[in-house]
Amino acid sequence: GAVVSQHPSWVICKSGTSVKIECRSLDFQATTMFWYRQFPKQSLMLMATSNEGSKATYEQGVEKDKFLINHASLTLSTLTVTSAHPEDSSFYICSAPTSGRLNEQFFGPGTRLTVL
Amino acid sequence: GQSLEQPSEVTAVEGAIVQINCTYQTSGFYGLSWYQQHDGGAPTFLSYNGLDGLEETGRFSSFLSRSDSYGYLLLQELQMKDSASYFCAVRDSNYQLIWGAGTKLIIKP
């Protein structure tokens, strides 16, 4: 099946710093990628839809100036959490559908962010 | 609003069969999917139903009734490794997924 990677798998940072998370489709091209956030024992919350070559579409309530998304190529989307605060600590996961299997999303392994 | 309802927790015995139900109320419907997520891991795709009926993949089966806005995931011959959270999700026209809150499946020996 299709493979999506994320880097880093976990990160600990001080409050006020910025953190960049990369999401790569390794064996397919992804014109669309989705970024989710998941708090412990909760469901996935869609943050934004990343579109290659255009601006990301953010869900209501998600600050686009705080969560910067860049989808510069067909295999890479990045999420930057700017000026991170403890309340941003969460599990961030990206996913992408493939052109041949549009009804199946492939998820990256996730990035656990802890802001001190 | 849009919502998917599924039980928060289900307990079953190893070797048994368990069914996890999902009812949905969404503005658009392009299919019902099921994902499995182990603690600390990312979701993995299990099945997709675009049309009414039963889809079978090994020990797992999924059913959909669009007229009832209802579906279920059936897990047979339960194994301890099946202990995980299971999410139903409805796909919209933009390939986004609207997620249920998840069902934690606890399997006892």
Image (tube, rainbow, N blue to C red):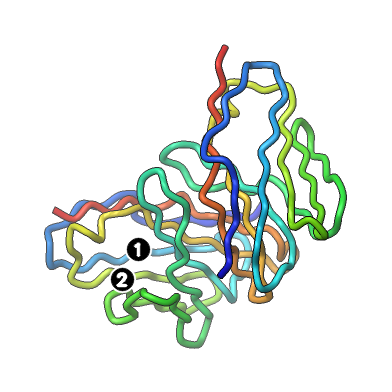
Task: Tell me, for residue A2, which label it has, or none.
Answer: none
Q: Quadrant of residue A105?
A: bottom right
Rendered residue at 26%/55% (across/down):
A89
Horizontal placement of A97 versus A54: left or right? Answer: right
Residue occupying image coordinates x 71% and y 56%: B32
**Residue A23 position in % (x across, y down):** 45, 63
> Which residue is pictured at 69% across the width and 28% down the height?
B18
Can you name the residue that lies furthest to the top here? B109
Q: The residue tagged with tag 1: helix, strand or loop?
A: strand
Chain to which mark 2 belongs: A
Numbered disc 1: what chain?
Answer: A
Front position in the image: B61 or B20:
B20
| Nearer the observer, A34 or B23 | B23
Image marks 2 and 1: residues in contact by CB distance under 8 Å? yes
Q: Quadrant of residue B59?
A: top right
Q: CA distance from mark 2 to mark 1?
A: 6 Å
B42 horizontally vs A64: left or right: right
Q: Amino acid at mark 2?
A: Thr
The image shows residue A11 at horizontal and vertical percentages of 25, 52
Label of residue A80 in the image: 2
Give the left or right position of residue B12, taking residue B19 as reference: left
Please provide percent x and percent y for residue A78.
39, 70
Tell me: residue A6, above or below residue B35.
below
Residue B70 vertical placement versus B83 (above, below):
below
> What residue is shown with label 1?
A21
